[in-house]
Image (spheres, rainbow, N blue to C red):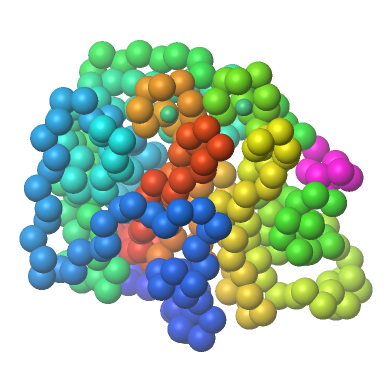
Amino acid sequence: MRYRTIAGVVSLLLCSLACGFLNGEAEPEVSAPAAAPAETAAEPAPEPIASASARTVILNHTVWPKGLVAFGCYDDGKWFAANQCPAKGTAVSIAAAEPGKLLLETSQAEFEPASEPDFSDEPYTTRRLVAQQQKTTREVATITAIPATHKTYVKLVGEAIGQEHPGIEQLFKIDLDADGSDEVLFSATFEQALNNMSAEVVQKSPECCDWANVGVRRVVGGEVQTTMLVNTGGRIRSLHQASIVGFTDVDGDGVLEIVTWEQQHQPHAYRIFKLDGDTLTNLGGLSVPEWWDPT
Ligand SMILES: [Ca+2]
Ligand SMILES: [Ca+2]
């Protein structure tokens, strides 16, 4: 068992100086998350919602607890935190943001509470998936890759995040709402920009030192707009990272929701964004203390 890696401690120290993720200083340019604030260890867990129509989004999580866990659930127009999701009910997967056909899996699932670490300064509660039946899979969209060096998008993404060398990591198009018009999604980080730039350019870059962004370009009112979903960075290196994890459909209406991941310091966080007409809403998230590793 290890408590905190050296990198984690360094990151925490850096972020005590530079970061304000959980304080909302770096919130994306969309409406605030609807998720309930994190509980403290002394507060009882909220009662699960009792609804047969709720759909729980399941996340394949690689740190703690490993495996499939409840990311959160959606019912009657509302998003609920993972520890409020029904113990039994409908679950929907997250299809990975990789080129090709997107397949979403729906199932009847059963969850159990995931026990919390016996110490934590970042309380985290979720539900672990323990049984899954009646799986059905349907094709929901196609992801088409765009070269990360595409000059037009290097320029557009660079303008969106204020960097001449944006460091595009992911760039692809997908029709989220099946209206026949593709949306373009991208992630861009300083780490990738470093890979693209010569050492001389890095030295001269006035924008140095860190950023991590996820954005979407889409048609709004007849014009293409860029909306940032994750938009973080600063002048102190703290290894900001961000990416598009994949897509899910929280309400089964055929319009895909976007799942992002970001790490501005500890913890790291997943977020889910819902496209409803011209509106893009941050439904909520799941923050995870990455330094916790019970193995
Ligand atoms: Ca579309
Ligand atoms: Ca949907």
Q: In this view, does 165 lie above or below 105?
A: below
Q: Position of residue 181 (x, y in %)?
A: 68, 24
Q: What is the tally of numbered marks visible in this picture? A: 0
Is residue 152 located in the magenta-colored stretch of the structure? yes
- Check the picture and name the quadrant holding the N terminus: bottom left
Q: Can residue 63 be seen in this view?
A: no
Q: In this view, does 276 lie above or below 293?
A: above
Q: In which quarter of the image is residue 133?
A: top left
Q: Nearer the viewer, residue 263 or 162?
A: 162
Q: Is 48 placed left or right of 261 in the picture?
A: left
Q: Where is residue 48 in the image (x, y as percent from the top left)?
A: 13, 43
Q: Which of 39 and 177 is in front in this view?
A: 177
Residue at image coords 23%, 21%: 108
Is residue 143 located in the magenta-colored stretch of the structure? no
Q: Nearer the viewer, residue 78 or 55?
A: 78
Q: In which quarter of the image is ligand 1?
A: top right
Q: Position of residue 46 (x, y in %)?
A: 12, 53
- Check the picture and name the quadrant holding the C terminus: bottom left
Q: Is residue 74 above or below residue 156?
A: above
Q: In this view, does 5 lie above or below 51?
A: below
Q: Is residue 144 visible?
A: yes
Q: What stretch is highlighted in magenta?
A: 147-154
Residue at image coords 41%, 15%: 137
Q: Is 184 placed left or right of 15 in the picture?
A: right
Residue at image coords 20%, 48%: 83
Furthest residue toward front: 221
Residue at image coords 26%, 45%: 80
